[in-house]
Amino acid sequence: MSDEYDDEYDDDDFDDDVDDDDVDDDDTGNRIVGARARAVVEHCAGNIVDEVDELDVESEESGGEVTLLIHASPSDMGRLIGRRGRVIQAMRQLVRAAGASEDIKATVDVVE
């Protein structure tokens, strides 16, 4: 049965008309540095705070590092930080992991 399959289909039939020379391995294209980390912060913080309209995530980039600054309502600061800082520490862990998937160092800070 495998001989029948080999005779019926050649490797050329499955060619995608894509040359290996056309594939660009350079990641310096039009991508936003830290986009995944920022999306993680916006999603997590958006589900934690009460006043989502006042939530803003600002990003500062320098080299291969991205710092994400969370601006929120003063009444939501305690929710974002959590008891003994556990919520913001968990968010920092998630952002570090998201940044690592993009080969960048990502950090999070809460500012007023």
Image (tube, grey):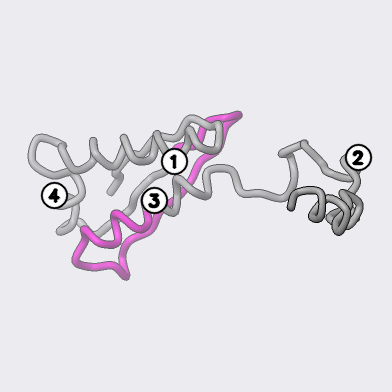
Question: Is residue 98 covered in magenta?
Answer: no
- Return the x and y of residue 61 as percentages of the image width and height: 55, 38
Q: Earlier in the sequence, mark 4 or mark 3?
A: 3
Kindly report the distance in space between the C-alpha atoms of the residues bearing marks 4 and 1: 24 Å
Which label sits in the foreground, 4 or 1? 1
Tag 2 residue: 21
Camera-nearest residue between 74 and 15: 15
Local SS, label 2: helix
Instruction: First in sequence, mark 3 or 2: give its number.
Output: 2
Real-space Cα separation, disc 4 to disc 2, in angstroms? 53 Å
Residue bearing mark 4: 78
Report helix, strand or loop for mark 1: helix
Amino acid under disc 2: Asp
Q: Nearer the viewer, mark 2 or mark 1?
A: 2
Q: Residues within 10 Å of mark 4 (few under 14, many from 20)?
A: some
Label 1 close to label 3 by CB (< 8 Å): yes
Boundaries of the magenta span: 42-67
Q: Which residue is mark 3?
A: 40
The residue type indicated by label 4 comes to Gly
**Which residue is depicted at the point 55% across and 31% down?**
103
- Camera-nearest residue between 79 and 6: 6
Is residue 4 depicted above or below 63 in this figure?
below
**Contact (Cβ within 8 Å) of mark 2 with mark 1:** no
Q: Which residue sits at x=45%, y=49%?
A: 38
Cα separation, mark 4 vs mark 3, equals 19 Å
